[in-house]
Image: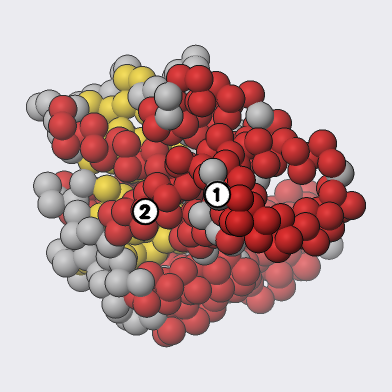
Amino acid sequence: MATTEGTSKAKPRSASGPSAALPDSCPILDTDALIDDPGVNVIVCCGSGGVGKTTTAAALALRAAERGRKVCVLTIDPARRLAQSMGLTELDNTPRQVKGIQAKGEGSLDAMMLDMKRTFDEIVISSSEPERAQTILDNPFYQALSSSFAGTQEYMAMEKLGQLRQSAQESGRWDLIIVDTPPSRSALDFLDAPKRLGSFLDGRLMKILAAPAKGAGRFGAKVFSTSIGVVTGTLTKVIGAQVLQDLQTFVASFDALFGGFRERAEATYAQLQADDTRFIVVAAPERDALREASYFVERLAVEDMPLAGLVLNRVQPVILPELSPETAIAGADRLSEADEHHLTAGMLRLHADRVQNAQRQRRLAERFCAAHPKVPAASVAALAGDVHDLDGLREVAVGLANG
């Protein structure tokens, strides 16, 4: 498994707080060493939906900028919480400077949100003559493909990462790009969907539909007509003549771009294997999220992609771990008999519930660490509310740094 050298640190974990969710045998992920490393230029935060990837990416970006890096953070979260937390009135396909950061040296922070349709449009416009590009952009099938087709968001996230990386190399505007991956049900969608979309666009059916536009000879046209007659007849029955016509028009106009899509997907995929890229897998201390994280860690190893470690997010903190839930519940039962101690009894029961929840989370974390003993990990406490400003992001970043 490819892991980041120099980003794990050895120190005892606290008996209380979020770090108590991780066993002592688990290496500690040193996020400060990771973001300070000049050899790391791309960090990809991935994981299943709803585990806090956006907040993690934003917090790391803010801390990196305030420690002197020139950072661009790309989010693909449609909830737009990143814009709110960074005090931006708008966040779109163009990187915008985040003001109010306490940067050292040349540190700076730009933020942007992926507009997948605009990114797709930019590819079409830059790769086609104006007339053909407009024909593609106006086509109903293209409009559906570019806005809602499965895999488009993940493909365009990787495409935008490639664009940012090229821009950074040419201009020197950024030396660190942090990516928040799409909120997919499965973390693996980020790796799999772009290849699926590229294969679809460069697939046999699309090539068959494009064949008439390639100007086959008379004999070739007869052969094509015979071979595709059954296919088009079936498609017409299934999707309708107008939809099929729109599809054929789209394919005929799009034909010049077919060859490039698979190559683009493969080139961007190869960038994820580069020496200056690191993956951070984000998970909540829940069974399904950690199972998904485990799958992703194993997949990264198979694909030889560099893993920095795991961030266990929204961990239940415990203030008095030495007070067992059994003792707390017994004390609450005794105090409940007296009217004047109902509040104290309620607090003891709340403590017992939190300790039991923390113990459950630790058991789940122990299973992950036992299955992946060499993967460094850091944990962050569950906050009382949503992160909505830079101070909130700093709190999360400090939690990450403390492991």
Q: Amino acid at mark 1?
A: Ala
**Percent of width and height locating residue 343:** 73, 49
- Quote the CA–CA distance across marks 1 and 2: 26 Å
Residue 315 vs residue 16, the one in the foreground: 315
Residue 283 position (above or below residue 111): below
Q: Residue at x 45, y 41 (%)?
A: 257
Which residue bears the numbered disc 2?
263
Which residue bears the numbered disc 1?
216
| Direction from residue 244 to residue 53 in the image, left or right | left
Q: Residue at x 47, y 47 (%)?
A: 258
- Which quadrant, please, contains the C terminus? bottom left
The image quadrant that residue 227 belongs to is bottom right
Residue 56 vs residue 211, the one in the foreground: 211
User: Does residue 294 appear anywhere in the picture?
Assistant: yes
Disc 1 secondary structure class = loop
Residue 165 position (above or below residue 265): above
- Which quadrant, please, contains the N terminus? bottom left
Disc 2 secondary structure class = helix
Q: Residue at x 39, y 64 (%)?
A: 310
Q: What colour scheme has been applied to the protein in the rendered image?
A: secondary structure
Residue 325 vs residue 34, the one in the foreground: 34
**Percent of width and height locating residue 355:** 59, 67
State the mark number for residue 347. Answer: none
For marks 1 and 2 on the same chain, the one whose residue lies earlier in the sequence: 1
Disc 1 residue crowd, few under 14, some 14–19, many 20+, Cα 10 Å: few
**Percent of width and height locating residue 90:** 49, 17
Numbered disc total: 2
Whether pointer 1 and pointer 2 mark residues with C-beta atoms closer than 8 Å, the reply is no
Q: Amino acid at mark 2?
A: Glu
Q: Residue at x 77, y 57 (%)?
A: 229
Residue 372 position (above or below residue 358): below
